[in-house]
Image: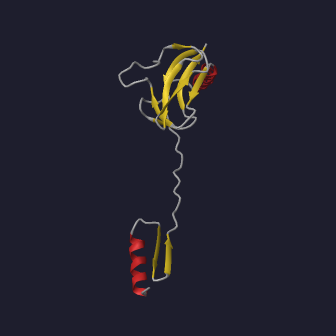
Amino acid sequence: MDLNLIKKLVKIFNASDITELEVEKDGVRIKICKQIENVTVPFVPQVTSQNISQPAVENSKTKEETKANEQENTANLHEIHSPIVGTFYRAPAPDADSYVKVGDTISKGSVLCIVEAMKLMNEIESDVNGKIIKIIVDNGNPVEYNQPLFLIETS
């Protein structure tokens, strides 16, 4: 292989977005690779504003009460997770009513939705009795394994 040809290949390779190139000609094999840098994005917490007009002592009590209320509220909340990777559907057919809506009371074994995987429709059933508080995934969206689908207030 001609040295000028190799130089041209390297120049083209460096100017492109290609990360790996392998060429074989006349029994000579050349492999060129670029090292890819991993870019990490730092986590930036969301900052919320507080009501400044209240005294600091009341504010700290309010925070403690809010935390206690949140813990009480989450104690009887249950998430239904997707058992498989697929597409989330709220109804058995596009023109049919949804299996459940926010506010519906459900029982253990009730069908909540369908997750389609490889053209198979898998019914997802509730494993608790309760009330639908939130439907986390939008209809027709892809879901991952163990992704939360519903938030249920257990009774």
Residue at 53% x, 49% y is: 42
Residue at 49% x, 14% y is: 104
Q: In the rendered image, which quarter contains the N terminus?
A: bottom left
Q: Nearer the viewer, residue 66 or 54?
A: 66
Does residue 144 sit above or below 53 in this rendering?
below
On the image, the x and y values in percent for residue 151 come to 54, 23
Disc tally is 0
Quarter of the view holding residue 90: top left
| Residue 52 visible, this angle | no
Q: In the rendered image, which quarter contains the C terminus?
A: top right
On the image, the x and y values in percent for residue 100 come to 47, 18
On the image, the x and y values in percent for residue 12 come to 38, 74
**How is the protein colored in the picture?**
secondary structure
| Residue 83 visible, this angle | yes
On the image, the x and y values in percent for residue 86 come to 49, 36
Q: Is residue 120 left or right of residue 130?
A: left
Q: Nearer the viewer, residue 104 or 120?
A: 120
Q: Nearer the viewer, residue 78 or 71?
A: 78
Does residue 89 sit above or below 100 in this rendering?
below
Does residue 56 sit above or below 40 in this rendering?
above
Q: Residue furthest left?
A: 95
Residue at 46% x, 19% y is: 99
Quarter of the view holding residue 154: top right
Q: Is residue 129 left or right of residue 21?
A: right
Does residue 82 sit above or below 10 in this rendering?
above
